[in-house]
Image (tube, rainbow, N blue to C red):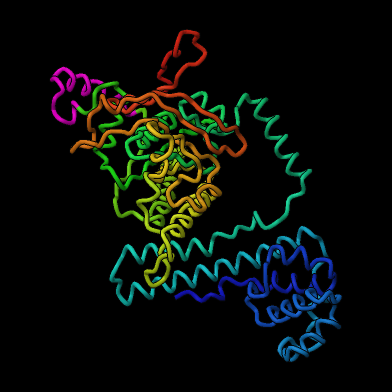
Amino acid sequence: MEDVRAHFDEVAESSVIGSLLWRQDDFTIVNAIIQGHDKFYSGKFRRIYQACEQLNARGVYIDTTTVASELRNMGHIAGVGGSLGLHEILNEQPVYTQKALLDYCRTVFQKWHLRQLRLVLDTASARIENGIVDVTEFLDSLEKDVSEKTRSRLSNCEPVLLKDAANAVLADIVQRMKDQKPPPSLSTGFPSLDGMIRRLRPGTLTIIAGRPGTGKTALAMNIAEKASIATLDGIPQNVIFFTKEMSNSELALREMSAFFDVDGGSIAELKGTPKDVAELTRNLAQLSMLRLFFVDNANISFGEIKAMVQQLRYRLQRSKEDVGLVIVDYLQLFRGIEKKGGKFAASREQEVAELSREFKIMSREFNVPVIVLSQLNREVEKRGGSKIARPKQSDLRESGAIEQDADTIIFIHRDTMPPEPGENGFGDAKNKDYVGELIVAKARGGTTGIVPVSYNGSRFRFLELDTTDESPGGEWRDVG
């Protein structure tokens, strides 16, 4: 087992303490990065820093005299070598520059981070040696522990001056104008929807919600198809689609139906003609242009999703590709984040709130757009009399934090009840066809509004209504 002392930099710790004894004004800068005396490995430096924390909290000036007095009150003055020990640290302080100080602070924090990870991995190793009963639970627990230790990122610890942030934004805009590159984002395949939500941007969480039978999975697949042929800054983007409800073969058949414009139900029930099957076989190679991955594990946990996305990214980056979009179908089928001892949150609302927050954090950590499908409450069907009323954000099932965490919320609305699915999951395709709306109920940085659409239930394809046409009702166009 590796000694955690290997992850210790005495020079960095001594330099940070020396700078504080020399210049009190540095404490605010230092503490913003180090975030507490527990980050020091050396007991001597840890106790000195704790004394500085206590003095700063009381508004007392920090120097060798006040720190020595505080250490005497704490009973630790002998442990740091007395007042002479403090002066020795001060005298060993290298020539002061703020950049050097910041580098030392980052080193102290990073070494602490590595020691914490070492402890997590040592604990995991010991559990393996003692025998693991439930491998899935063990991997979930390990992923959660590692995530908690690595969630704090040094690059986010330092405040950024508005002027610097604005300069960075402007420089990026100027460079992209020069290179004729738009901001990184993926199209949904629906021009009006793209205009409202400003497309699918890295680091954003989008919720697509609707009642059963409204075509949530189909809409997500239509978006996935468009995104899976995209490139960002010359890098091909891949889509990974997690489902707890359907098999890979069902999703593949749906995509074939939509992509080749054939009746999926007829093919699934072997009612298609030999000519239809031969046509599919001939054109199957065209599907290779879609960089779309399916994961159909009904028992997959959030931790496994995160680990799988990370693994796929590593794999793709070797061939200069990346994961551009993550889709999860659907939120209410997931258990909450499992705590130690196999326990979950006290209520279902709390579980969904935890999941919603974790998916948002994942989108930021991986810098990819994440789409999560969600159910709506039955209450929406009880409003509006003979026709179903348009849904509201409060209709999100176990909504809680979903409204707050999501950057974009899109409702699929049809004002009549959808038919029940058939045994093969396709149901009566003709009765599934409908004219409806994609309602943008929330769009952070964009605008809310309604996109008129039609849904072809036999081909699992949404089409956008071209409202620019002056003829009655306009025209439907395939924007995929």
Q: Which image quadrant for residue 57?
A: bottom right
Q: Nearer the viewer, residue 212 or 46?
A: 212
| Magenta-colored stretch includes residue 377 | no
Percent x, y of residue 135: 31, 65
Q: Is 384 situated left or right of 181 in this image?
A: left
Residue 29 or 438: which is nearer the viewer? 438
Residue 199 in the image, given as x and y percentages of width and height:
54, 32
Which quadrant of the figure has residue 29?
A: bottom right
For the residue pair 448 and 414, the one nearer the viewer reads as 414
Q: Which residue is located at x 62 percent, y 37 percent? A: 445
Residue stretch rendered in magenta on the structure: 266-288
Q: Residue at x 46, y 26 (%)?
A: 189
* 413 left or right, relative to 157: left
Q: Is residue 271 one of those drawn in magenta?
A: yes
Q: In this rendering, would 387 be left or right of 107?
A: left
- Nearer to the camera, 44 or 336: 336
Q: Main secondary structure of the magenta part?
A: helix
Residue 463 in percent (x, y) is at 40, 22
At horizontal 67% and vertical 25% (from top left) the residue drawn is 178
Instruction: Please provide percent x and percent y for residue 283.
Output: 26, 21
Q: Quadrant of the N terminus?
A: bottom left
